[in-house]
Image (cartoon, rainbow, N blue to C red):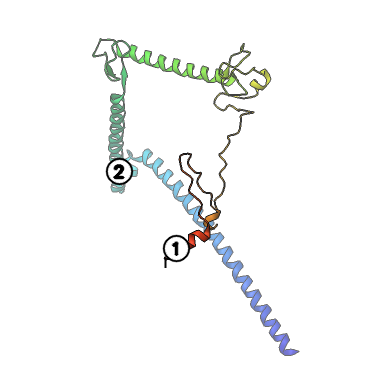
């Protein structure tokens, strides 16, 4: 029993040591993660402090003395950043101007294509500001008309038989002539998705299957033509005697 007791104790010690090592590894990773987060936070705060101190002390010789290279380097970087930002602003403004220059309107008076950047229509002299306003109003009217048409279509009655639009006062469908069931017509939804009921199902032609393995005599024979002449029936004995040579 002493041997087995020692073996059991050894296994228990090994398990305990493995658990302790795993626990230490997990704690180490957690502590390193927190330490990394705190390091990043300190760097951000130090950068903000440095920027604020630079702005407050860049013109004070008491602070710049002995640190001229640092202050001059920061000033040079700020000048380069400002120059790059100016270039970006110019590029964006040019892109916006090009987009406006490519935008054109059709003059409602003479039909000439007019650039948005122009002041007057080159065809009739109408001010572009007025053309722009008329084009905007026309677009708004088209959108309003389309919305009104959609709303009217949504409220329209549909013939339960053929799916055609039915007027409010119609008693019979103008498309199929069926009497209108008002409740059924209301329940049919919009013209874009009519529901047609009681429509006759299509009748497919009935084709008898043909057995390709059937013997030839089982296959249907073509009907005899009305103009075909009947052939005389020759008895089998006569046919055999006709085939024999004469002595």
The tag on residue 243 is 1
Compare residues 209 and 137 and report the one nearer the observer: 209
- Give residue 29's position: percent from left, percent from top: 54, 62
- Give residue 88's position: percent from left, percent from top: 30, 35
The tag on residue 77 is 2
Kindly give the residue lying farthest to the left in the view shown. Answer: 122
Left or right: 163 with respect to 109? Answer: right
Q: Residues within 10 Å of mark 2 (few under 14, many from 20)?
A: few
Asked if 5 appears above or below 208 in the picture, the reply is below
**Quadrant containing the N terminus in the rendered view:** bottom right
- Rounded to the nearest angstrom, the CA distance separating label 2 from label 1 is 123 Å
Q: Name which quarter of the figure residue 58 lies in.
A: top left
N-term-proximal mark, 2 vs 1: 2
Visible in this render: residue 212? no
Kindly give the residue lying farthest to the bottom in the view shown. Answer: 2
Visible in this render: residue 188? yes
Asked if 223 appears above or below 3 in the picture, the reply is above
> Residue drawn at (61%, 27%), measured in percent from left and top?
196
Asked if 92 appears above or below 212 in the picture, the reply is above
> Residue drawn at (59%, 14%), measured in percent from left and top?
167
């Amino acid at each position: 029993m002493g041997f087995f007791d020692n073996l059991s104790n050894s296994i228990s010690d090994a398990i305990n040591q493995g658990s302790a090592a795993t626990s230490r590894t997990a704690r180490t990773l957690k502590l390193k993660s927190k330490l990394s987060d705190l390091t990043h936070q300190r760097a951000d705060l130090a950068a903000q402090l440095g920027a604020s101190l630079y702005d407050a002390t860049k013109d004070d010789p008491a602070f710049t003395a002995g640190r001229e290279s640092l202050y001059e380097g920061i000033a040079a970087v700020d000048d380069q950043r400002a120059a790059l930002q100016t270039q970006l602003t110019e590029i964006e403004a040019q892109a916006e101007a090009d987009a406006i220059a490519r935008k054109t309107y059709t003059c409602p008076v003479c039909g000439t294509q007019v650039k948005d950047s122009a002041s007057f229509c080159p065809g009739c002299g109408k001010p572009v500001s007025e053309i722009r306003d008329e084009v905007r109003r026309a677009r708004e009217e088209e959108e309003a008309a389309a919305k009104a048409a959609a709303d009217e279509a949504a409220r329209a009655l549909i013939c339960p038989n053929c799916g055609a639009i039915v007027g409010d006062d119609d008693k019979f469908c103008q498309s199929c002539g069926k009497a209108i069931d008002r409740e059924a017509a209301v329940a049919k939804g919009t013209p874009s998705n009519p529901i047609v009921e009681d429509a006759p199902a299509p009748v497919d032609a009935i084709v008898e299957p043909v057995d390709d393995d059937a013997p030839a005599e089982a296959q249907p024979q073509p009907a005899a033509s009305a103009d075909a002449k009947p052939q005389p029936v020759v008895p089998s004995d006569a046919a055999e005697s006709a085939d024999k040579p004469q002595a």
